[in-house]
Amino acid sequence: MQVEQFYYNNDQGTFSMTHRQAMSHNMVHNHFHSTYEVFYLISGERCFFIKDRTITIREGDLVIIQPNILHRTTNSSVSKHERIILNFHESFMLKVNDSFFQVLYPLFEKEYVIIKFAPHDRMYIEKILHTMMEEIQRESTGFELYLQTLVLQLLIFCCRYIEQNDIVSLEYPSPVHERISEVASYINQYYTENLSLSVLSEQFYISPYYLSRVFKEVTGFTFVEYLNSVRIKEAKKWLEQSTLQVKQIAKKVGFGSVTHFGRVFKEVTGHTPLYYRKKMKVL
């Protein structure tokens, strides 16, 4: 059961904000996009799988994820939660300041960063986020420009926080999680090759049946879902950043058939490769 409290997406598709309070929620679909994501957990607990590892996110934690990084959230032992998510395209912030990413390099030098705020700092973060929602609801003159400055305030505060505080290294919940993280890292490195459960089971000395079951339990993905998502994620980058033909991209990311590639691409993203390329050129 869940209640969507708040949702906003601007006309250009370059900024969105959602606020949800739910008793339980598991993301159904594989999730990656061309925007930066800021995930702030107001209360509760979530299991967050990001790229190749599972991390437990708790009340007051903030996660910043770069574009095209595969991630998915699932219930933890505490399924009731409240969270706010911001998504913004780089073009949304470059309108404010051309040096945006240079100034905030500590936040964006890694594929994702997790910040665990102290209680008094959480009050400041939550004040900025609630001000954003109030601005969106009022739609007063210049509210989108003000949203940009509020996002900038939030990120500058996060950047200064990690510069002034020691970021605790993330531990694996269990040896099984660490092992599956190694498997996921291997897939990320060798996704262009002819990978299968049997190949991975030989590589990591795990039975195919056990690997299949545990991989799903730890990551929330089946092996095929994860491999396809990694391949399609990389294909999206080529569509955005190159002029290669679709059939060339399909081959580069490990698909033997362009027809199969097109079908999987649409299953994962909801669109055809050509549609997606045209859409990205608009931003």
Image (cartoon, rainbow, N blue to C red):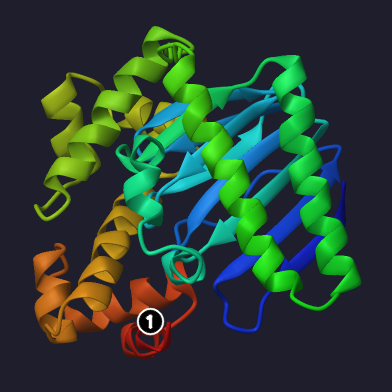
The one nearer the camera, 105 or 55, is 105
Q: Quadrant of residue 233?
A: bottom left
Could you tell me which residue is drawn at 70 percent across and 64 percent down? 146
Could you tell me which residue is drawn at 49 percent across and 77 percent down? 270
Which residue was labeled with disc 1? 280
Q: Relative to residue 164, is residue 257 drawn left or right?
A: left
Query: Residue 50: x percent and y percent?
Result: 43, 38
The one nearer the camera, 252 or 170, is 170
Q: Amino acid at mark 1?
A: Met
Q: Relative to residue 246, is residue 269 drawn left or right?
A: right
Query: Residue 197: x percent and y percent?
Result: 24, 39
280 versus 65 height, above or below: below
Q: Relative to residue 58, is residue 97 drawn left or right?
A: left
- Residue 198 in sight from this viewpoint: yes
The quarter of the picture where the C terminus appears is: bottom left
Q: Quadrant of residue 14?
A: bottom right
Q: Relative to residue 45, is residue 169 drawn left or right?
A: left
Query: Residue 87: x percent and y percent?
Result: 57, 58
Could you tell me which residue is drawn at 16 percent across and 63 percent down? 253
Q: Secondary structure at mark 1?
A: helix
Query: Residue 20: x percent and y percent?
Result: 81, 48
The one nearer the camera, 129 or 272, is 129
